[in-house]
Image (cartoon, grey):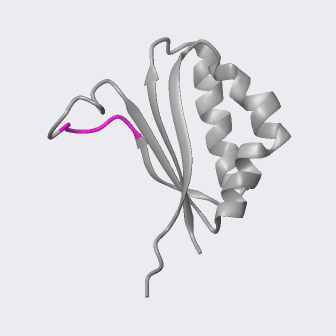
Amino acid sequence: MPAYLVAIARVDHWTEDFQKYADQAADLTTEHGASYVIRGAPETVCEGDLLRDRVMVISQWSSVDAAKAFWESDQYQKKIKPFRDGTGIYDVAIFEAPDAT
């Protein structure tokens, strides 16, 4: 069953290292067979304040296990994720897609 990795971030310091993070995370996401549904800031916030000044990333995966394999991989955790250290606040979760039947 498909899954989604969802990240909502407040990026306070868009550094050169953060750009490396964004580029390398995108490459690794593609290498792991996932695709982006959303990647960026909202065009319009229609209601509320939670999403103001935030960036959202939603990637679609073949399964929860595939999303976890990406997230838990040494490549992501040890080589890519450290580039974002000190750049903002990040909330990340993996969701299983609802059954289509």
Which percent across, then down, holds residue 55?
40, 32
For the residue pair 80 and 8, the one nearer the viewer reads as: 8
- Quarter that holds the C terminus: bottom left
Q: Where is residue 86, by image quadrant?
A: top right
Q: Is residue 33 above or below residue 38?
A: below
Q: Which residue is drawn at 27% across and 27% down?
A: 52
Q: Residue at x 55, y 39 (%)?
A: 92
Judged by its main secondary structure, the magenta piece is loop
For the residue pair 81 and 92, the one nearer the viewer reads as: 92
- Quarter that holds the N terminus: bottom right
The magenta stretch is 40-45
Q: Is residue 41 magenta?
A: yes
Q: Residue at x 65, y 25 (%)?
A: 20
Q: Which residue is drawn at 62% across and 34% down?
A: 23
Residue 71 showing in the rendered view: yes
- Does residue 65 appear left or right of residue 42 in this picture? right
